[in-house]
Image (cartoon, rainbow, N blue to C red):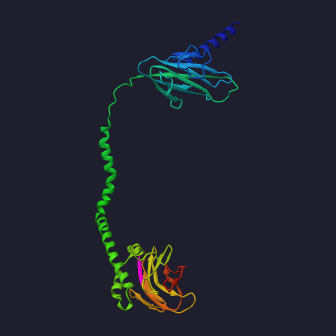
Amino acid sequence: MEGRHLAISIAILAMISLSKGAVADSEFLIEEDLDAPETIWGSEGVGGNWIILPENNSTILGTFKLNDSVDLYAIEISSSNWTTIRFSVSGNDSVSISIQRLNQSTWSIEEYANEDMGEISLDQGFHAIRLERLGNYEEEIDYRFIIRNMGNFDESGEYVNLAWMFAPFYVFAGLFLILPMLVVIWWNREKILASSFGSSELKESEIQVLTLLRERFSADRGSVDFKQINEALSTLGRDSWNAISEEFGKPEIRHFTENIDISLWRVQGGSGSFLIGIKTDRSKWEMAAIRINTPLGEPIKIDSVVPEMMFQDDEIYLGNLEEKTTTFVRLEVFGKAPEAEIHISGIVEGSPIAAVPAKTIAMEEE
């Protein structure tokens, strides 16, 4: 018998110790003594069917009955200052908790915080604590949640704008970020100024040259000054490509690949007079040549070439075309062929290459 009494005494002491441990860090242990409501109170306010929790440190024990998914508790804040409440659910992943700060006139929700946030600031009055079951609706679930009063603070205090303290930092950061760009601009100031003034001068020069070419191309062959045309074509370069397209219009033939761009314009005033533009890209063309070929085999010959270049029968020898350069050639051909093809050939990176536009040239001007 004495052994049995001793065992009972030890069991009672153990239960008391566990109970004390459960509330060791809480001032109040509150147990749900009636079924907590599922919806917030209305305009009548908090009634007698509500469990009202104090703002002090508390541990609350409750149970979800069968098919009961939501429990709401009221918490009363008595302090006239704002109170920070920290909260959490202990030892149950099937229950979530949130606190809702309510408007004290309309009882609408103005702010809420879930367990991920873990705390919320509440003003004086009544607010709501919401517990929600996460699954397992066919069985009762016990839950335990803890609230902690973290203290009060006065939100009505005057806020001071301290943005002026950061002004020096913003100035320093701005100068630090802009300084590299200013240094690069200063180093390249001559190129930038030369480019801005040079582009306008180049455009005006291009207009003059192209106007001269159009006049000379339109003149009779007997009155053509080939020396002037030769000088004019020699001044045109890579930057003149767009200007020529604007002046002479859309090319009659256009062919371009990754290595070369070829355009052919018909010169006004002659059915066999053409202007050919050749623009190289990333590769140099060595021993380049232009050939005027007739697909039907009729004879055709080149009569003249400007600027002066070596030519024979139906072929013009261009020589070497450096990478990223533009060459313009004005040529006149004669023959009875109704149409002709243009071939550009040369050696690129050690391999012979030919560029052949798919479209043929009509020898008679339409």
Q: Is residue 123 visible?
A: yes
Query: Magenta residues?
Result: 325-329
Where residue 70 sits: x, y (%)?
61, 24
State the residue in front, 26 or 107: 107
Q: Residue at x 32, y 67 (%)?
A: 195
Magenta stretch: residue 118 in it?
no
Point out the residue furthest to the top here. Answer: 1
Q: Residue at x 68, y 27 (%)?
A: 137
Please give the count of numbered marks on the rendered protein: 0
| Residue 164 shown left or right of residue 12 in the figure | left
Magenta stretch: residue 326 in it?
yes
| Residue 130 shown left or right of residue 192 in the figure | right
| Residue 178 shown left or right of residue 320 in the figure | left
State the residue in front, 17 or 79: 79
Main secondary structure type of the part rendered in magenta: strand
Quadrant holding the N terminus: top right
State the residue in front, 96 or 276: 276
Rendered view: 111 above or below 29 = below
Where residue 114 sits: x, y (%)?
53, 30
